[in-house]
């Protein structure tokens, strides 16, 4: 409990970089509309350098997640406000894009489902609620929990990370301040220093952009490493609507060289699985054999074709 007490006692956050005033935008309220847009754009450009500097830590985090998935574990994002919503967004987009099980990547937000659509700011102040949400998800040693708190002080996130650590899960701390670090061990810290915001303290801006970029990297790189991508094509996508069906057919056409009508027939014969359809056509085999060979190679199309 001492960890939670220390977090709650941080009344003055003025020393945090993300809470300081940006000298480059002090007079933004006097600018023309175009000048305001240019100022925001110039600040956003700084985000990419900050994220790039963290690439080694991001890569280590990806390797942790890949290992977890191979061991039957899950990836969980935990955050409050913008951080929580970004985690939920990233998690929800993986199943249609990569055909991943919805249960292996999930986002948890302070305040629950209602907080996704409506600000519930007080929900982030209670570390015990973060711990409780981790308990309810039955987090264990196979899982990876990413605590997202751009300021690095959110009690809810700290409580969740602390509980995850107690349960021997792998823990990743993602923040945008150099002044904040958990008062307990975590496996990896990803710390893009994005600097003061355009509007003081509005971390939905640069810090939020950095968070989105990093979460994209974590899941995209992981999906590539577990065989969900062939070349740069999302061959494991779920053809659940017209757009995705069209994309699946075009992927089959691109890899195999068949026309649209044949791609459609192949996709149907593969029960909507573009990956299997590609192997069927390239190797001249039926669905059961293609599925068998893919399973034997961990789902990697390249390994099967080579």
Image: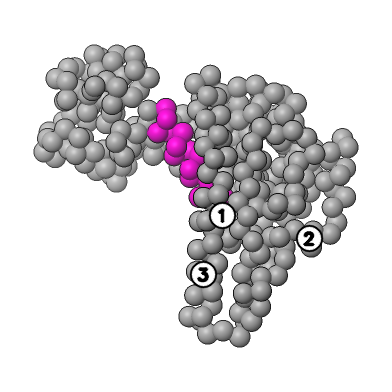
- Residue for point 23% across, 23% down: 305
Magenta residues (range):
211-226
Q: Earlier in the sequence, mark 3 or mark 1?
A: 3
Dot 2 crowding, Cα within 10 Å, few <14, some 14–19, many 20+: few
Q: From the image, which quarter does the C terminus lie in?
A: top left
Residue closer to the observer: 57 or 109 = 57
Whether 32 is drawn above or below 2: the answer is below
User: Within the magenta stretch, is there residue 265?
Assistant: no
The answer to whether marks 2 and 1 mark residues whose Cβ atoms lie closer than 8 Å is no
Q: Which residue is mark 2?
A: 15
Q: Image quadrant of residue 121?
A: bottom right
CA gap between label 3 and label 1 equals 14 Å
**Could you tell me which secondary element the residue under label 1 belongs to?**
helix
**Could you tell me which secondary element the residue under label 2 belongs to?**
loop
- Residue for point 66% across, 56% down: 119
Q: Earlier in the sequence, mark 2 or mark 3?
A: 2
Kindly identify which numbered label has been placed on residue 303.
Answer: none
Q: Which residue is mark 3?
A: 42
CA gap between label 2 and label 3 equals 24 Å
Whether 41 is drawn above or below 256: the answer is below
Q: Give the dominant element type of the magenta stretch: helix, strand or loop.
A: helix
Dot 3 crowding, Cα within 10 Å, few <14, some 14–19, many 20+: few
Q: Which residue is mark 1?
A: 50
Q: How is the image coloured?
A: one colour
Q: Earlier in the sequence, mark 2 or mark 1?
A: 2
> Could you tell me if residue 108 is visible in this image?
no
Q: Image quadrant of residue 95?
A: top left
**Residue 229 screen position, x and y as percent:** 34, 34
């Amino acid at each position: 409990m001492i960890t939670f007490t220390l977090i709650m006692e941080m009344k003055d956050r003025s020393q945090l970089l993300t809470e300081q005033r940006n000298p480059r935008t002090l007079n933004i309220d006097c600018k023309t509309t175009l000048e305001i847009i240019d100022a925001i754009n110039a600040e956003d450009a700084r985000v990419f350098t900050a994220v790039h500097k963290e690439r080694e830590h991001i890569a280590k985090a990806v390797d942790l997640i890949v290992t977890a998935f191979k061991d039957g574990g899950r990836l969980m994002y935990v955050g409050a406000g913008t951080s929580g919503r970004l985690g939920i967004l990233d998690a929800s987009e993986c199943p249609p894009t990569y055909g991943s099980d919805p249960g292996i990547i999930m986002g948890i937000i302070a305040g629950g489902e209602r907080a996704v659509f409506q600000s519930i700011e007080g929900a982030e102040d209670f570390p015990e609620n973060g711990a409780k949400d981790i308990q309810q998800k039955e987090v264990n040693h196979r899982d990876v929990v990413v605590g997202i708190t751009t300021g690095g002080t959110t009690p809810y996130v700290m409580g969740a990370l602390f509980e995850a650590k107690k349960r021997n899960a792998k823990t990743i701390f993602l923040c945008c301040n150099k002044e904040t670090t958990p008062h307990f061990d975590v496996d990896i810290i990803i710390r893009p220093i994005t600097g003061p915001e355009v509007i003081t303290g509005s971390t939905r801006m640069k810090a939020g952009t950095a968070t989105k970029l990093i979460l994209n990297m974590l899941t995209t790189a992981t999906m590539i490493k577990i065989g969900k991508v062939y070349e740069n094509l999302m061959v494991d996508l779920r053809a659940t609507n017209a757009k995705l069906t069209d994309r699946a057919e075009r992927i089959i056409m691109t890899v195999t060289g068949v026309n649209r009508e044949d791609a459609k027939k192949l996709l149907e014969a593969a029960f909507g699985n573009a990956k299997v359809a590609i192997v069927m056509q390239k190797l001249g085999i039926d669905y059961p054999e293609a599925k068998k060979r893919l399973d034997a190679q961990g789902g990697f199309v390249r390994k099967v074709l080579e």
